Amino acid sequence: MKLSNFVRQHLAAFRALLVLTVITGLAYPLFIWLVAQVPGLSDNANGSIIKVDGKPVGSSLIGQQFTDKDGNALPQYFQSRPSAAGNGYDPLATSASNLGPESIVDTPADPSLPKDNNGYKASLLTLVCGRSLTIGQLEGVDGSRPFCTGEGVGAVLSVIGPRDSLGNVVHPTKVVSVNEPCETTKTPFLNTYEGVKVECAKFGDDYTIGQIVPIRGAAPADPAVPMDAVTASGSGLDPHISPAYADLQVNRVAKARGVSPDRVSELVLANQEGRLLGFFGEPTVNVLQLNIALDQKYPAKS
């Protein structure tokens, strides 16, 4: 190849690079940005930021916590659902817990290690049980759920003994409440199972050899605490709660603000969003927008 042809080809490639860089790297992004600033589109394009007295307080698309410095719920505010994103609603750590319906056995804590780093990991069942119990106490309702103990952990047994051809234990010889370690309880949630005394779990013992049996208990089939109150969303950033969870919080918020529950319920209804296009999804309530409306109309007493 002659040098002149080589130079000509590379100059043509360089010119194409410059033209495409200007079109795709400058002109197109600038055009999209200008379109995004059109009234009606600019709010969503700029992050759906909500401002109060000219100051940004959050986004209508990202949830946030309404707790004190110790993580306790502020009684004058509606609470969001749990979040698995970082320490809660961290946009830089959006995630789910990745725990599924089969997550019912806790990873036990090593009693020889410090409490804040002892290896304990709650199962999804225990997380749900504990949250339901806490919310029930906060809202003054029954926080019990099926397959949960009265202490707010998963009601799960390891039943050890000979098995039949299907793998089911036919004559239990030992029964252990796997989510109740002996360091925290001496009396498991159930006294006996099929005539065998139920024991608390001892760290280091292998209970996977037994048949894992969840115990339903006497809790109502329709718990007072809604499901979205005890489970995190897939992103960990969901700004909405269900109308049922909002209704559960009305009395507490009304009492903290010194107004009637009916007036708070009116604000809940005013901030309720219906199904997308009338049939996609379920009705929701945006927690941040509801709490802002509360502050504006019924300021909390100091």
Image (cartoon, rainbow, N blue to C red):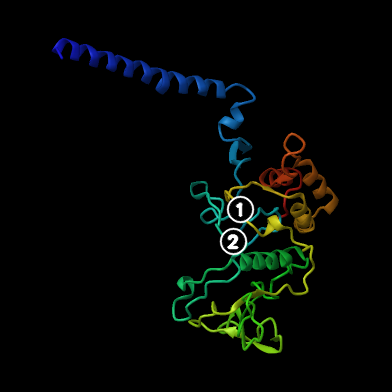
Q: Position of residue 54 (x, y in %)?
A: 61, 35
The residues tagged by marks 1 and 2 sit, at their Cα atoms, a distance apart of 9 Å
Looking at the picture, does residue 270 appear above or below residue 38? below
* Residue 142: mark in rendering: none
The answer to whether residue 139 of the structure is visible from this angle is yes
Give the residue at x 55% y 83%.
Answer: 183
Q: Secondary structure at mark 1?
A: loop
The tally of labels here is: 2
Q: Which residue is mark 2?
A: 71
- Left or right placement of residue 14 versus residue 246 in this view: left
Give the residue at x 83% y 53%.
Answer: 261
- Left or right placement of residue 55 versus residue 248 in this view: left
The answer to whether residue 260 of the structure is visible from this angle is no
Q: Secondary structure at mark 2?
A: loop
User: Mark 1 vs mark 2: which is more N-terminal?
Assistant: 1
Locate the C terminus by quadrant: bottom right
Give the residue at x 72% y 45%.
Answer: 285
Q: Position of residue 142 (x, y in %)?
A: 77, 68
Q: Position of residue 198 (x, y in %)?
A: 65, 86
Q: Identify the amino acid type marked 1.
A: Gln
Q: Are marks 1 and 2 in contact (CB under 8 Å)?
A: yes
Task: Tell me where residue 290 sits by quadrant.
Answer: top right
Q: Which residue is mark 1?
A: 65
Foreground residue, 284 or 78? 284
Foreground residue, 39 or 168? 168
Task: Tell me where residue 159 sits by quadrant.
Answer: bottom right
